[in-house]
Image: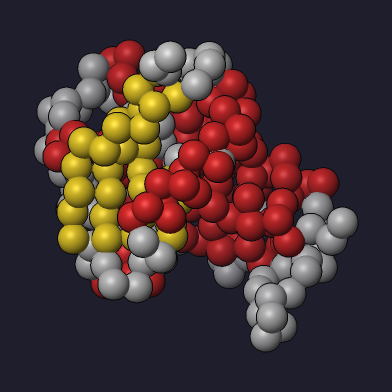
Amino acid sequence: MTGAVIRVQLERTRQRSFATAVDWPGWSRSGKTPELALAALAAYEPRYRAVATVAGLPLPAGPLDFEVIETHEGDAGTSYGVPSRLAAVDSEPTTAPDARRLAALVVAAWSTLDRIAASAPEALTKGPRGGGRDTSKIVAHVRRAEAGYAPQLGVKAKLPDEPSAEEVAPLRRELLDVLERPSDGQPIAKRWTARYAARRIAWHALDHAWEIEDRTPR
């Protein structure tokens, strides 16, 4: 039986590949090969399904079919570990309902990170070489990164090294104000379009939320 179709973009380099569900901001996973990236995307469906539900935009029920609609050669960002290639669909205009939907999924990604971090211990399991940030450092990293993303949306921002939830809230409101506006699909201020901005911001929050979850001692 055929399930609902999830449109996927692939970006690939010799070191790493990313599979991204282009209609579902934040649902993007990597692997050494495109095939492994697709397998990781499918494996994270239950986790992303919970995020979409928080946004009030549940994924289709039943089995899902992943349809690769675009494949691109990645760049240095891809190799480093970031889904950095814009897809053709990222340049599609956003209507008012589209814009509200993108913003809702970004908010759900932020709230997922906040929820997971709040219930996690400060000290997380280290990697094989002892590396990895602990919980508060991960949360601070995500918040500071959003200040770095802000110019792509035409927003000026400066945050302290370890911003609190109260300190990052005005910035996030400004970012949402931009994402909630209908767009013509062109870059907002620099390179990012509204659709790409939403999926990049949501991916970063969820990637680290799931990292905290996976590194919480059992």
Q: Quadrant of the N terminus?
A: top left
Residue drawn at 54 percent across, 57 percent down: 142
Horizontally, residue 45 falls left or right of residue 150, namely right
Horizontally, residue 91 falls left or right of residue 106, namely left
Residue drawn at 33 percent across, 14 percent down: 97
Q: Residue furthest right?
A: 218
Residue drawn at 35 percent across, 22 percent down: 5
Task: Note whether residue 8 is visible.
Answer: yes
* Image quadrant where residue 15 sits: bottom left
* Image quadrant where residue 122 sits: bottom right
Query: Where 104 sits versus 144, above or below?
Result: above
Horizontally, residue 162 falls left or right of residue 159, namely right
For the rendered model, the colour scheme is secondary structure
Q: How many marks?
A: 0
Q: Position of residue 130 (x, y in %)?
A: 71, 83
Q: Quadrant of the C terminus?
A: bottom right
Q: Position of residue 79 (x, y in %)?
A: 33, 70
Q: Residue furthest front?
A: 1
Q: Position of residue 149 (x, y in %)?
A: 36, 55
Nearer-the-camera pick, 205 or 164: 205
Q: Position of residue 115 (x, y in %)?
A: 72, 40
* Image quadrant where residue 184 sits: top left
